[in-house]
Amino acid sequence: MSRISLVEPDLANDEIREMFRRMEKLGFTLLNVFKLWANNPKAASGFLLIAEALYAEPKLLPRHRELAYLRASQVNDCHY
């Protein structure tokens, strides 16, 4: 159980619900980290601006983007 409450879509205000909808439109699964950020709409909207810039009109094929993620994880010794 998290120490900070997660904002569930059905209990969120209209602003947060719209952010969740935009995240899902970009292809994101509504992860708990997004529900956590919803406690601070300013931070969540900042992430959303970056995500939309990167994912709304991607220049890389999904396969190449995933390869970049994998390589970055490998270089940074991420095991997860």
Image: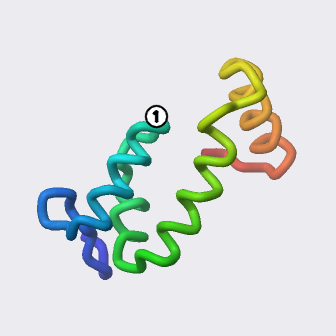
15 vs 11, nearest the viewer: 15
**Residue 62: percent from left, percent from top:** 66, 22
Quadrant of the rendering where the C terminus is positioned? top right
- Residue 17 lies, with reference to residue 52, above or below; the image says below
> What residue do we see at 73% from left, 37% from top?
69
Residue 39 horizontal side relative to residue 65, left or right = left
Q: Nearer the viewer, residue 38 or 17?
A: 17
Whole-percent x, y for residue 36 in the image: 37, 69
* Residue 5 image position (x, y, % from top left): 26, 76
What coloring was used for the rendering? rainbow
Q: Give the left or right position of residue 19, taking residue 75 as reference.
A: left
Residue type highlighted by circle 1 = Gly
Which residue is at a point 24% across and 70% down the rendered structure image? Answer: 1
Q: Is residue 70 left or right of residue 76?
A: left
Q: Quadrant of residue 33?
A: bottom left
On screen, residue 58 above or below 32: above
Q: Which residue ends up furthest to the left in the rendered image? A: 10
Position of residue 35 measured from the top left corner of the image (x, y, whole percent): 34, 63
When the figure is inspected, residue 26 is found, relative to residue 20, above or below; the finding is above
Q: SS class of the residue under badge 1? A: loop
Q: Residue at x 36, y 70 (%)?
A: 38
Q: Is residue 30 above or below residue 1?
A: above
Mark 1 Cα shell of 10 Å, populated few (<14), some (14-19), many (≥20): few
Residue holding disc 1: 27
Residue plotted at (41% across, 79% down):
40
Q: In the image, 76: left or right of 63?
A: right
